[in-house]
Amino acid sequence: MNHSEYKILLVDDERDILDFVGYNLKNEGYQVFTANSGKSGVKKAKEVLPDLILLDVMMPEMDGIEACDQIRKVPALENVIIAFLTARGEDYSQVAGFEAGADDYITKPVKPKVLISRIKALLRRRPVAEQKVSERMEFADIIIDPERYHVELKGEIVDLPRKEFELLSLLASKPGKVFSREEIMDRIWGTVVIVGGRTIDVHIRKLREKIGDDRIKTVKGVGYKFEQLD
C-alpha cells in the first residue's frame, strides 16, 4: 500500500535506529525525514510539518520530553501526532511524555511489523481526533472553541496541549454526563493503541491545574464529568 501522502519525522541520536526504522518506513511508502538530536528535530519539524513524529527520549543537549514540549508550542504543529520511541519503560518518563503532549509510547527494540502497525493505527486516528467535537461551547466563565483549539477562562486564553483540549471538549460536550475511563480512552486515544494506564489521570490533573478543580469531577470507580458552573 502506498502511504506517500504521509510524512514521518524520525528523531534519534543513534544512527543505527535512524537507518533501521527509516528503512522499514520507506519500504511502506512513507516520506521519511530524520534528525539526530532534539534541537535539530524541532527545527526539522518546523520545516517539513510532518503528520507523525517518532521521538527518542534520551538525547544529548535537548531530550525528547523538552523537544516534544517545544514542538507542541508551534501553532502549525499543534495537531501533529507524536510517539516516543524509546528503551525507557519507567512509569515516570511515560507520565512526563504525556504531560509534554505525546500521543503514544513505543518501547524499543520493536519488531518492524509491530512498529508499522502502531504507526498505521496512529495515523488512522488523526482525522477522527480532529473531528470529535466541532461546536463552540460557552458556559458561565469559560468558552471552548474546538474549531480553533481555543479556550478562554474569565476572558483569559488558556494554553492547552492537544490531548488536554480534546479531553476537555469531550467532557464539556455533555455537561453532567459521566464519561467512563473506557469511553474516554476510546474517544480520545482510540482502542487500537495501548497507552499508559495513568494517561487519563495525568491529563485530568493538568486540566484541573489550568481551569480549576471545581469543573471536572471524579466519579469514583466510573470516570469523570464536566460540571457547568452558575
Image (cartoon, rainbow, N blue to C red):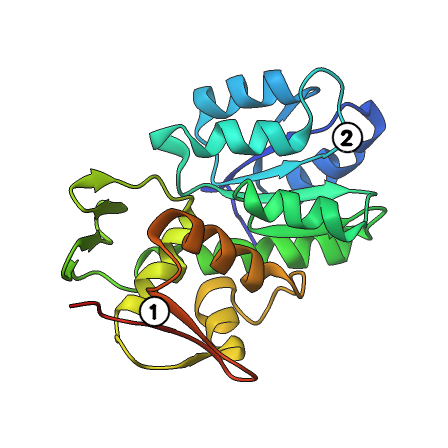
Residue hosting label 1: 171
Label 2 sits on what residue type? Met
Q: Where is residue 59 in the image (x, y as percent from the top left)?
A: 75, 24
The quadrant in which the C terminus is found is: bottom left
Residue hosting label 2: 58
Q: Where is residue 205 in the image (x, y as percent from the top left)?
A: 51, 56
Q: Is mark 2 on a helix, strand or loop?
A: loop
> What is the number of the mark on residue 186?
none
Query: For this view, does 119 lie left or right of residue 223?
Result: right
Residue that appears at 46% across and 34% down: 72
Label 1 sits on what residue type? Leu
Query: For this view, does 104 lie left or right of residue 227?
Result: right
Residue toward you, 71 or 197: 197
Residue toward you, 193 or 25: 193
Residue that appears at 75% across and 38% down: 21
**Residue 138 visible to the viewer:** yes
Residue toward you, 208 or 50: 208
**Residue 163 visible to the viewer:** no
The mark closer to the camera, 1 or 2, is 1
Image quarter of residue 130:
bottom left
- How much space separates mark 1 and mark 2, taking CA atoms? 34 Å
